[in-house]
Amino acid sequence: DRDHAENFITNFKKPPRRPTPSELIEEYIDSYNAIIIFPHPEVARLKGISLQNIEDLLSKIPQRYHKNIGIEVYNWMCQAFFWKRAKQEKGIHNYNKSLKLAPFSFTDYHEAHHVGNGNTAIYMNELTSKAYIEAVQEKRTSPYAVSNRSFSEYVQIMKAALIAEGLTRFGNRQFRV
């Protein structure tokens, strides 16, 4: 929320020693009521964290912090490499049932053509940061990895995005698709 975010920006200092990931998670949740989401697990290309590392990390964090932690069970990789990733991501979604983390999808986008291929529905009583945090803590999230676009439309969007990215790099300008 705004107060916690301003507190974070105002008081952030480089620590005297590098804290462990579990220490950072506990500090951010304690200090800022942060929501921590593990993005694209098992996607080596994007340096995604392995499920084993997530499990190890969770074992080092007291259970009371787990309510503020989520995992991306679906992402754009299942759209790009559906023959391989869809099965794996279904497995991650099912595996998360044992982890009991809030499930998310499409938490970030690495390329323009990823936008719009999925989302996470978060069921809140009102549109506030407090309601968002409560919804995540109560696992009222529903990940979707579905696109209602036809494959040819998806290919056209990819082409346009790649052309725009190429022109941006070439001319050092911003182009909209």
Image (cartoon, rainbow, N blue to C red):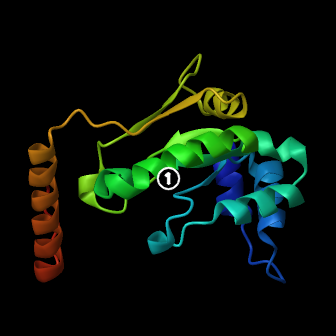
30 w.r.t. 21: above or below: above
For numbered disc 1, what is the local secondary structure? helix
In the image: residue 6, left or right of residue 46: right
Look at 74% across and 73% down and name the residue there: 13
Question: Residue tagged by mark 1?
Answer: 88
91 w.r.t. 17: above or below: above
In the image: residue 23, left or right of residue 111: right
**Could you say where residue 160 lies in the image, as x and y percent from the top left?**
10, 58
Q: Residue furthest right?
A: 62
Q: Quadrant of residue 9?
A: bottom right
Q: Residue furthest top?
A: 125
Look at 83% across and 50% down and name the residue there: 30
Look at 16% across and 48% down and name the residue there: 154
Q: Image quadrant for the C terminus?
A: bottom left
In the image: residue 28, left or right of residue 84: right
Q: Image quadrant for the N terminus?
A: top right
Task: State the residue in front, 173 or 51.
Answer: 51
